[in-house]
Amino acid sequence: MPVDKRKFGQLDSGAQVDLFTLTNRHGLKAEITNYGGIITSLQVPDRNGDLSDIVLGFDSLERYLDEHPYFGALVGRYANRIANGLFELDGKQYILAKNNGPNHLHGGESGFDKQLWKAEPVLEEERCGLKLDYASLGGEEGYPGTLVVTVTYWLDDENELRIDYEAFTDKPTIINLTNHSYFNLRDAGKSHVLDHQILIHADAFTPVNDNLIPTGEFRRVDQTPFDFGVPVEIGARIDDDDRQLHRAGGYDHNYIINGQAGELRPAAEVYEPESGRVLYVLTTEPGMQFYSGNFLDGSITGKNHIAYHKRNGFCLETQHYPNSPNRSQFPSTRLNPKEMFRSTTVYAFSTR
C-alpha cells in the first residue's frame, strides 16, 4: 500500500508544499497536503466499482491560499465557535480574533488550516498513512501554552480513512480539533446533497442563538426537523418553519452523539442513492457538527471548474461542543501539562 509524494506548490516564504497520495488495494485514494493537513481529493468506488472524487476542494495550492470555507482542512487550536472571542482560564481572560462576526471561529485568522505541517509517510502491514506534526507556540492566535500536535491519517483495505489526533501542552490551554471536509457522495459538489439520506446517532443537539452560539440547552431531537434517528433525506425538512433552521439557514448544529465519549462509536451514516455510496462516521468525540453547506453561494469555483452552490456539500465535523470554554455544563476542552489529548475519527466507505 504505497504513499506517493509530489510537489504541490510553494509558499511566499519559499517553503515547498507537498501532496501525498494514500492508496489501498481496492484503488481508494486519499490525497492530502501538508499545508493545513487538507484532504484535497478522496476517490471512492461506487456500486459499480467506478472511482470518483467525493470531496469539495481545489486543483492547486494557490486556490487553497486564498480565502475559502475550510475545504478539507484540519482546524484548531479550537474548532467551531467561541462567543465574543473570549474565554477565561484559571482566572485570566484570553482575547481571540473575531473572524466570524462577533465570534472566534476555527482557530482564528491563521489557524491550523493555514500552517505548513511537518509530514512523514508511515507504513504498516495492513495500512498506509501520513503523519503530520505542528507546534503551535504559546500566544499564537491568543491561546495560552505551546501546543504540540500530531495528526495521523490512516487508510486500510477495509476502505476506512482513520484520523488519529494527539497533543500535549506546557501550560493549561484549550483544544478542539476536527477535519472540515465537505462531502458530496454523488459528484464532489456538482449537484446538491438534499437527496442524500442521513442517519445521526444522537438523541439531542445544542440549539443556537442568532450568532450560532449554543444557548447552553440540551434539546431532544424528537418530533423536530433535527431527528435523524432513522435515515431521512437532508432536504426533507431543511426548509421547515423552525427557528433553529432559520437562524442557520439550514443545518449548522452540534449533535450530542449517543454513547460514551472517549470510546469509538457510530456517529452518522449517509447514503447516496444514485451512486450507491455509503459513508459511515465513527468517533471518540462527544459531539458532531452537521453542516448542510448553507453559506456556499456559487461564488467559489473548485475542481473541474465546478461552482459550489448552496447545499452542494455537507460536513460532519466530529468535535467537542462549540463555546465549551464558556459553558461549564459542556464537556471540558481544557488540556493540562503532563496530559495527552487523544481523539479518533473514522470515515468508512461501502456501497449498497
Image (tube, rainbow, N blue to C red):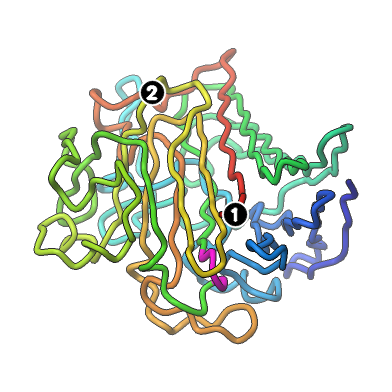
Q: Which structural element holds mark 2?
A: loop
Of mark 1 and mark 2, the one earlier in the sequence is 2
| Image x and y of residue 240, in percent | 14, 64
> Considering depth in this image, is 231 or 138 the residue closer to the camera?
231
Span of residues in magenta? 184-188
Left or right? Give the position of 64 relative to 208. right
Q: Which structural element holds mark 1?
A: strand
> What is the three-letter code of the residue carrying label 2?
Gly
Residue shown at the point (15%, 56%) measured from the top left: 210
> What is the three-letter code of the residue carrying label 1?
Thr
| Image x and y of residue 131, in percent | 76, 40
> Considering depth in this image, is 194 or 308 the residue closer to the camera?
194
> Considering depth in this image, is 288 or 54 the residue closer to the camera?
54
Q: Are marks 1 and 2 in contact (CB under 8 Å)?
A: no
Spatial CA distance of label 1 from label 2 is 26 Å
Question: Which numbered marker is on residue 58?
Answer: none
Give the answer, above or below, for where 346 lies relative to 23: above
Give the answer, above or below, for where 317 lies relative to 192: above
| Image x and y of residue 22, in percent | 80, 52
Is 145 inside the magenta-drawn segment?
no
Left or right? Give the position of 54 relative to 193. right
Circle 1 sits on which residue? 351
Circle 2 sits on which residue? 259
Residue shown at the point (9%, 64%) measured from the top left: 241
Helix, strand or loop for the magenta stretch, by majority: loop
Pointer 1: residues within 10 angstroms few (<14), some, or many (20+)?
A: some
Quarter of the figure that contains the C terminus: bottom right
